[in-house]
Image (cartoon, grey):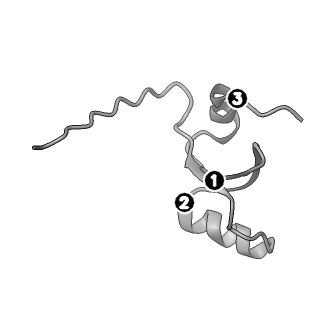
Amino acid sequence: MEPKTYIQLQEEYGGKFIAIKEKQVIATGNTHKELVENLQKSHIERKGLIFEFIEPKDVICIYNISIKR
C-alpha cells in the first residue's frame, strides 16, 4: 500500500489526531487522549510511532516563528 499524500489524509482524517507506523495510519482519535486510548485498547506500543494532527480539509494554516534575541 502506497503512503497517502497530505491532501488524502485531510480528506479521510481531517480534524483528527493520527498515529503513523511505517508510513501507514494505524490509529485515530478526535483528541490526542482518545488516540492514545485507542492505541492502548488495540495493544499497540507507542514506541516508534509518529503522532500528527491533520488539519481539516480546505484549511490553510500559517505559522509564524519569531526568534527573540
Q: Earlier in the sequence, mark 3 or mark 2?
A: 3
Which residue lies at the image location 13% right of the left edge and 43% below the top edge? 68
- Graded by Cα atoms within 10 Å as few (under 14), some (14 to 19) or many (20 or more), the crowding at tag 2 reads some
**What's the mark number on residue 8?**
3
Which residue lies at the image location 80% right of the left edge and 74% below the top edge? 43
**Residue furthest left in the image:** 69
Label 3–label 2 contact, CB within 8 A: no
**What's the mark number on residue 41?**
none
Q: Amino acid at mark 2?
A: Thr
Which quadrant of the rendered structure holds the N terminus? top right
Q: Quadrant of residue 29?
A: bottom right
Q: Amino acid at mark 3?
A: Gln
**What's the mark number on residue 31?**
2
- Graded by Cα atoms within 10 Å as few (under 14), some (14 to 19) or many (20 or more), the crowding at tag 1 reads some
Residue 38 in the figure: left or right of residue 54: right
**What's the mark number on residue 50?**
1
From the image, state whether disc 2 or disc 1 is nearer to you.
Answer: 1
Q: Secondary structure at mark 1?
A: strand
Across and down, in percent, residue 15 comes to: 55, 44
Which residue lies at the image location 74% right of the left edge and 32% below the top edge? 4
Residue 44 in the figure: left or right of residue 47: right
Residue 57 in the figure: left or right of residue 13: left
Q: Nearer the viewer, residue 30 or 63?
A: 63
Q: Secondary structure at mark 2?
A: loop
For the residues marked 3 and 1, what is the alpha-carbon distance in whole angstroms?
A: 17 Å
Q: Quadrant of residue 35?
A: bottom right
Q: Earlier in the sequence, mark 3 or mark 1?
A: 3
Q: Secondary structure at mark 3?
A: helix
Q: Quadrant of residue 47?
A: bottom right
Q: Amino acid at mark 1?
A: Ile
Label 2–label 1 contact, CB within 8 A: no
